[in-house]
Image (cartoon, helix red, strand yellow):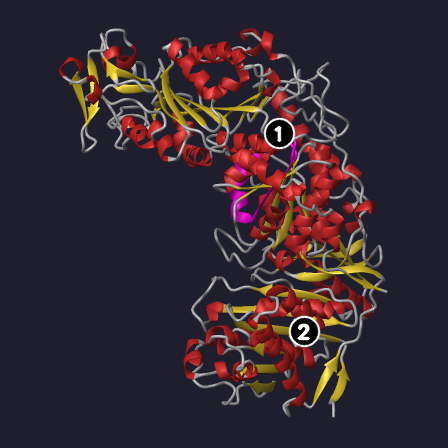
Amino acid sequence: MQRHAPYPQIEHTDPSDQTRKDFTSDQEVRWCPGCGDYSILAQVQRILPSFGIPREKYVFVSGIGCSSRFPYYMQTYGIHSIHGRAPAIATGIKSVSPELSVWVITGDGDGLSIGGNHFLHVMRRNVDIKMLMFNNQIYGLTKGQYSPTSPLGKKAKSTPMGSVDYPVDPVSIALGSGATFVARTLDVNVKHLQAVLARAAAHKGTAFVEIYQNCNIFNDGAFVQLTDKDTKSDQTVELEHGKPLRFGKKLEKGITFDAQLRPSVVDAADVDESTLYVHDEGSEISALMLSRLKSPDFPRPIGVFRAVERPSYDGMLEDQVKQAQKGSRPTVQELLDDGAWTVE
Amino acid sequence: MSKAVETVSTVAIRFAGDSGDGMQLTGTQFTDTTALAGNDLATFPDFPAEIRAPAGTLAGVSGFQINFSSAAVFTPGDAPDVLIAMNPAALRANLGDLKQGGMLILNTEAFNKKNLQRAGYGANPADDGSLKNYKVFQADITGMTLKSIEELKLNNRAAVRCKNFFALGLVYWLYNRSMEHTVEWVRQKFGEGELAEANLRALKAGYNFGETTELFDHNYEVEKAPIAAGRYRNIAGNEALGLGLLAAAELSGLELFLGTYPITPASDILHFLARFRNLGVKTFQAEDEIAAVCAALGAAYAGSLAITTTSGPGVALKAEAIGLGVMLELPLVICNVQRAGPSTGMPTKTEQADLLQALYGRNGECPLPVIAARSPGDAFYAAIEACRIAVKHMIPVMLLTDGFIANSAEPWAVPDMSSLDPIEVSFRTDPTGFAPYSRDDRLARPWALPGVPGLEHRIGGLEKENISGNISYDPQNHELMCKLRAERVQRVADELPPTEVFGDDSGDLLVLGWGCTFGAIRGGVEAMRERGHKVSHVHLRHLSPLPNDLGEILRRFDRVLLPELNLGQLVKLIRERYLVDAKSYPKIQGQPFKESEIVEAIKAQLEAH
C-alpha cells in the first residue's frame, strides 16, 4: 500500500544492471578459513542480482552464531539481532513493509534451539520471508558444543562421553510446521545451491532452505559422505518434481514405497520404472516421508521437498487493512468523543 | 406518597457477587449514569483470579466499587458506605471494608445452606447478630427478579442472570438516579427480544421495590459536582492508553504496529487496537513475549510507530530485545501494565514494583526513558508522550501503568486533537554523507528505512563505532558509546516543562509520588492542607530522566514522604541521586492506597517533626 507523508516517496534503482559487486559490503569477512559459509555467501551474492529486485529492497536479518554474521557482508539493509529471534524481527519488518524482500539467516542452534519457537510460528503463518539455515550440526561461535542436529552420541566439549539427546531434522520440523516451501542443499554443491536459492527467492510465502554446511574447525567432515565424489551419488538422492527417485553413480538405484508406506532401495533394473516413487512437490505427506530418509539405509534427499502456494500472513494482514478501509473510517477525535456528554 | 430524600455529599458503593453475577456490568452502568448525573467519581473493579471459580466460593467473588460526590473525587473511596452482597462469599470477602454503620444489602435467596457453607459460614450471619453494627437490608433479589419476568419465556438460568439488573434498579432508586441511560444501553445491546425485555423488567422491578418496600424509609441525593464546562466521557486506563497510541499515530503520521502477547492486565489494549484495521493499525498477536517485542523492533526499523504491550513477567522476557532496541537506537514504546509480582504473583491485583526493572532490568549499561501514567485518563497523554520521546530521540521508551489504572474509570475531559502538538518525524533519504550512527542535537541517529536507495546499512547488537555504526571492540569507543547512550536519555530532561508543585512551593512536607498513587496522595494532601498543614504534592511523570528541577524542589521542604505500592523503589533513587532523607511509605497488598492511609502517613511525618 502507498505510504503517505512523513514516509519518503521512493524512486527505486534499476535492478537490471546490478552485479555481485553491488551486493558485497566493505566489511572484512571473518569466518575461519575453509568455512562452508564462504561458499554460501558467494552464491547468494552471485544469484541475488538476477532476481530483478533493486538492492535497497533486500533486508537480511540474522540471530547469533557464525552464520548470523552474514548480514554484515551484504551491501543491503540488515539487522544482526539476538539469539534465535530473527524470524520474529523479520515478521515485524515484512508485516509493515510487504514490498521488501526479507531474508533470515540462521543456524541449527540459533534456529532450532533458542529460536525453535519462532521457527515453528513463522512457518505456520507463512510469512513471506526466505530462511536459510546453515546446518553444521555443531555450535561454532561458542567453540564446539553439540547442537540439536548433532547425532546421538556426539562427542563435543560439553559431551565428553557423547551426547544423550536425539537430533531433530530441520526439514521435518519445517514441514510439520506447515512451511509452504522446503528445500535442502549443500554448501559445496554450488550449482544445486544456486538453483535452490533461485526457487526459494521466487516463492511467495515462507521459503525454508536447509544448507548442510561444513564447520572445518569443530565438526569437520560431518557431511563428507554427502559431498565426497566417491560416495555422494550413493549417499544422496536428488528430488525433482515429476521424476522418479533414482540415485547411484549411474542412477542404477531407486526408491519405492510399499502399500504400508515403508520405503525400500531397489535396483532400478529389477523393477518396473512405474513402481519407483515419483516426486510431487505438492504432496505434504510424501514430503514428510522423504524427510525421514536417513543413512545408512537410505540416501539423503536434496532439492525441493515441498512447494505449494498459500496466502501469506503479511498478504492477508494487508488485505484486512484494505478491506477495513473500504468501510467508514472514524477519526481519532470521533473515537475520543464516543459516549461523551456536555457539561454546561 | 414518595419517600423523603436525604442529601449527602459523597458515597462509596461496592457491588459484590459471584464472577458470573454481572457485578462489573452493574458497576459500569451505575458509573455511566452517575457521570451523566454530573457527579465526580472514581471506580475500582476488583476481579477474581479465576475466570469462573466454583459458584459461591470466595475465590469467585468479583467486586466493583464506585465513589461519587458533589465535590472533587480523587480515589474510588476508602471504606464503602454501601455494600451489595449477592451471596455469602461476597459478604465474607468484602464485609471487612464496609464502614461501621454502613448499609448492607443482602440477596437472601443466595444465603442458603450450601452457599453459607461454601463461604465458610457456620450460621447465617444475617441471623446470628454478627452484623449488628451495620444497617442490614435483606431482600430476595433473585426471587423478585424471577417473579418480575415470569411471563417471559426465559429458561431459569437466563432468568436468574437478570438479578444484577434488579440490584441495579434498587440502587438507582436508592440514589435517586434516572434509569434512562441503562434502558437505552439494554435496547442497544440486546435489541427488542425477550432478553432485553427481561433485563428491563428486572431493572424496573428493583427500582419499584425500593420505592414501595417498607425496608427503606427514604432515599439519597448526591448533587452535581462543580465540574468545569466542557465535553466529558468515562474512560478506563487501558482504553485511554489505546486511544493515546492512536492519537500518537495521527499526530506523527506514522502507521501503528502493535506486537504483543496476551497477558493480564494488558490484553485489553490489544483487544481495543485490533478493532482499528480501518485506521491502518496492524496488531500482531505473537507466539510469545519475545517475538512480540522483536516484531515491534522489526516494524520500527521499517518505519512504524512500534509498540509492545505487556505486564511485568513479559518485560522480564523482553529484556534482551529491549537491550537490542537500545543498541539499535530505534523508536519503540514498551507498555508495562504492572501487576503484583514476583513471578506470576497476583495477575489481577495492582502493584508498582516494576520500576527498578524498568530502569535497570537489562544486561550491561542499558538506560532508557521511563514514564508513568497517574490515572486512567492520564494514560492517554502518557502514551502520546512516550511515543513523542521515542520518535524524537530514536530510543525505546518504557511506559508504566498498572492494573488499577488499567481497569478503573473516571470522568474525563475529552481532548481536542487539534490542540495537541504534532510529533515531528524525519526519515533520512539523502545518501550523501549518510552514516547510520551520525547524530543530531538530541544525539539521535537518522531513521533510515529499508527500501531507500543509497542508505543500505547494517545494524546489530554488537557494540558499534559511533557515527559509522561498524562493529567495534575498541575500548575507548565502548566507553564513549555507553556514555552517549546515557546522555541520550538525560537529554530528554532538557525539553521537559517545569515540575508542577501542588500547594506551596516550600513547606514542612513534600509528598512525592508517581503512577497510580496520584488520586490518594492528592486527596490526602488536600485534606491536610484544609486543616492548615504546610504539605505539598509533586507527582512525577518522568522517572528517567528525572526532571532537572526536582532536586531543587526537594530541598525547599523540610521532609519528603514517598508513598509507593512496592517496598520502596523510587525512594532509593531519590535518596541516592539527591542525598535527601526521603521517607518511604510502602504498601504491597495488591490494592491501591486509600486516602486515609496517606493522611495518616502525613500526620505521622508531621508529628515526628
Instruction: Give the residue furthest to the left.
Output: A270
Q: Residues within 10 Å of mark 1 (few under 14, many from 20)?
A: many
Residue B331 % position (x, y): 66, 34
- In which quadrant is the N terminus of chain B drawn? bottom right
Could you tell me which chain the residue with mark 2 belongs to? B
Could you tell me which chain the residue with mark 1 belongs to? B
Kind of residue sitting beneath label 2:
Ala
Residue B301: mark: 1
Tag 2 and tag 1, C-beta contact below 8 Å: no
Q: Does the magenta stretch include residue A161?
A: no
In space, the residues marked 2 and 1 are separated at their CA atoms by 49 Å
Name the secondary structure under disc 2. Answer: strand
Reading the image, the residue beneath label 2 is: B12
Residue A282: mark: none
Q: Is residue B351 left or right of residue A68?
A: right
Residue displayed at 73% across by 18% down: B430
Q: Give the range drawn in magenta.
A: B303-331
